[in-house]
């Protein structure tokens, strides 16, 4: 591998990690707070992508598309949580099964609405086109760099939110001991609804932001569900730093192995998961269950 | 009680007799396109019901094991030109070994973690099969797989194949029923209910779960061999995420903790996919909604619905207690509260 290739592959890994982080962070926070494994998370990503594409195409405004995607996915997530999950709260397996059922229906309805086509976005001119990197004079899509920066900002904002604000402190306390938080007078149900809507909205936003770097098509829901699963299994469920580190690890390993031995790349992510689980069953940053 | 027991025997004989003679009086379509696939898919669903209901492990990798048996058979007989019996032994061995390896990774976790890890494992194998051309044949998979030929008859001839599926299904059904009464089966159910206590009693909890997972893999592998003969080809689509989940749908429709329910669920599933697709393109929505309705309103599934009248007769006096015991979801008890 030449240096140019190496840098390009590394950048591809980093930008993919950015996307994995954006998708998985909602998944892991929802899990951490509510013990709900939302297996419809990939569907929310795809749904956000489709809705965002439709709005962006009609209005010619990419940002409007992204915002609408986030809002619509958040509302969909909230509806899922309030209508289907809340009545069976606390039965974690049953909740996981319900989200599986929702993902089956959602995949089919989205296929009916948007068909099996591949959709591409056209982001604003300021963040599209190519950029020349100062190192080695490598050309790289400007949008991918935007994606990286965007995920960094989201991660930083989330971190500040979780560590520096009253809401964040309440959320972290609820992750540790939700009965106690409820006992001291916090409306935990409202916190749950908020977190679910937030995580779903982030997934929907990622649908547009990630779909603009790659593309949106039916089947992507499963791909990003898998990415979220592996990232949270490796990073430890409910942990923000864990999600960041695991996204980096998974995406970089995936890109390097795709470049080095393309036909066995899937085995490498499997091995990564196995090694982590063998050493730390609770994930890199997870606490023992 | 004895009257009920003899009614039961008569009923069982009647059902088995009807099933065995089905090719004689049933329509060709139902024999070949509905019951045969329902039986081999039912074997995969049975392996899941066994794990979920009695081992407390909801595995989403059962279809992967099923598919790997097919791949093993296909690679050996088509790519390497081996005779069919090598393919059968090889397919079973590959799938069981894969199940053992998955088990090694997954059995240390419980509940939803187990579900997530087996789902991820299954999806990784799908990705591998899709990417890898040299062994798995990439996106196309392996075509032109021929079923064994025994004394001039191809095993996929309609009636013959049906009887074969029925025989394997009955054997696995009885095998699982027997296994659950052995000390191993009882220990497994105890592991499901309270792993900590079992560990304190000196049982090796992880080893029990690993053995159960490997056995379930062996079972699913039999279904996989029948499946690959039926289809005559195997491709990554056989093990994509939709198929992985479909087995769960079958098991849940039948009643997740029910051995009979697995086949009932598979039959219902095949019927819905075959007939709903003739009047609506959105049969996956129909299936998804059915699944949702069952998870939300009738967690014991179809077998729960059917067993209800019998249950009432048998346990009229203990009805109230039974209702408390049967948790909302059969698995609820399986998972235990230790996770919290």
Image: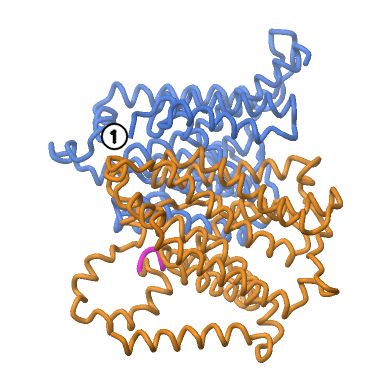
On the rendered image, what quadrant is the N terminus of chain B found in?
Answer: bottom left
- State whether residue A27 appears in this view: yes
Magenta-drawn stretch contains B295:
yes
B91 or A22: nearer the eye?
B91
Residue A170 sits in which quadrant? top left
How many labels, in total?
Answer: 1
Judged left or right of residue B69, residue B300 is left
B138 or A56: nearer the eye?
B138
**Which colour denotes chain A?**
blue
Q: Residue at x 28, y 66 (%)?
A: B326
Q: Residue at x 48, y 25 (%)?
A: A244
Q: Which residue is mark 1?
A: A175
**Which colour denotes chain B?**
orange
Q: Chain of mark 1?
A: A
Colour mode? by chain
Identify the magenta region: B293-297
Q: Is residue A39 above or below residue A151?
A: below
Name of the residue lying farthest toward the left: A184
Judged left or right of residue B198, residue B223 is right
Residue A199 percent location from the top left of the image = 41, 40
B108 or B142: nearer the eye?
B108
Q: Is residue B44 above or below residue A262?
A: below
Q: Residue at x 61, y 59 (%)?
A: A113
Residue B210 percent location from the top left of the image = 48, 45
On the rendered image, what quadrant is the C terminus of chain B found in?
Answer: top left
Predominant SS along the magenta part? helix
Residue A149 percent location from the top left of the image = 54, 22
């Amino acid at each position: 591998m030449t240096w140019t290739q190496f840098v390009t592959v590394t950048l591809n890994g980093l930008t993919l990690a950015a996307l994995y982080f954006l998708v998985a962070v909602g998944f892991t926070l929802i899990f951490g707070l509510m013990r709900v494994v939302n297996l419809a998370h990939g569907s929310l990503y795809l749904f956000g992508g489709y809705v965002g594409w439709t709005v962006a195409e009609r209005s010619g405004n990419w940002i409007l598309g992204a915002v609408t995607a986030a809002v619509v996915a958040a509302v969909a997530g909230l509806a899922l949580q309030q209508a289907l999950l809340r009545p069976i709260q606390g039965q974690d397996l049953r909740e996981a099964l319900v989200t599986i059922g929702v993902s089956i229906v959602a995949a089919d309805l989205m296929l009916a609405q948007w068909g099996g086509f591949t959709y591409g976005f056209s982001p604003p001119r300021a963040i599209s086109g190519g950029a020349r990197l100062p190192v080695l004079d490598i050309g790289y899509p400007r949008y991918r760099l935007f994606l990286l920066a965007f995920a960094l900002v989201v991660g930083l904002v989330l971190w500040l939110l979780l560590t520096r604000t009253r809401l964040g402190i309440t959320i972290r306390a609820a992750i540790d001991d939700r009965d106690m938080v409820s006992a001291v007078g916090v409306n935990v149900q409202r916190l749950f609804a908020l977190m679910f809507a937030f995580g779903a909205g982030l997934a929907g936003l990622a649908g547009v932001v990630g779909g603009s770097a790659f593309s949106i098509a039916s089947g992507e829901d499963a791909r990003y569900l898998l990415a979220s699963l592996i990232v949270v299994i490796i990073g430890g469920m409910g942990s923000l730093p864990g999600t960041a580190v695991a996204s980096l690890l998974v995406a970089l390993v995936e890109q390097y192995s795709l470049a080095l031995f393309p036909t066995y790349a899937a085995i490498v992510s499997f091995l990564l998961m196995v090694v982590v689980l063998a050493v730390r069953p609770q994930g890199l940053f997870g606490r023992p269950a | 009680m004895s009257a009920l027991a003899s009614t039961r025997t008569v009923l069982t004989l009647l059902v088995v007799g009807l099933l065995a003679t089905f090719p004689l009086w049933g329509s060709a379509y139902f024999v070949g396109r509905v019951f045969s696939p329902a039986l081999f898919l039912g074997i995969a669903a049975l392996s899941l019901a066994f794990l979920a209901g009695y081992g407390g492990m909801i595995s989403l990798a059962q279809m992967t094991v099923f598919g790997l048996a097919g791949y093993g058979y296909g690679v050996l007989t088509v790519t390497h030109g081996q005779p069919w019996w090598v393919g059968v032994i090889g397919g079973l061995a590959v799938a069981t070994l894969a199940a053992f390896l998955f088990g090694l990774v997954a059995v240390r976790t419980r509940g939803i973690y187990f579900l997530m890890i087996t789902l991820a494992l299954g999806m990784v194998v799908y990705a591998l099969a899709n990417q890898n051309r040299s062994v798995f044949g990439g996106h196309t998979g392996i075509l032109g797989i021929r079923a064994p030929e025994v004394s001039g008859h191809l095993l996929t001839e309609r009636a013959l194949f049906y009887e074969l599926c029925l025989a394997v299904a009955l054997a696995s059904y009885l095998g699982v029923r027997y296994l659950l009464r052995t000390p191993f089966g009882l220990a497994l159910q105890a592991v499901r209910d309270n792993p900590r206590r079992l560990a304190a009693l000196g049982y090796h909890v992880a080893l029990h779960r690993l053995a159960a997972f490997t056995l379930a893999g062996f079972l699913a592998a039999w279904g996989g061999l029948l499946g690959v003969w039926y289809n005559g080809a195997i491709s990554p689509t056989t093990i994509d995420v939709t198929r992985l989940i479909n087995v769960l749908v079958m098991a849940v429709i039948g009643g997740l903790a029910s051995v009979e329910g697995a086949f009932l669920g598979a039959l219902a599933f095949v019927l819905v996919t075959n007939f709903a697709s003739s009047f609506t393109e959105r049969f996956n929505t129909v299936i998804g909604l059915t699944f949702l309705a069952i998870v939300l309103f009738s967690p014991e599934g179809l077998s729960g619905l059917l067993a209800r009248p019998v249950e009432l007769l048998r346990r009229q006096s203990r009805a109230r207690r039974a209702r408390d015991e049967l948790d909302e979801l059969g698995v609820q008890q399986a998972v235990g509260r230790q996770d919290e």
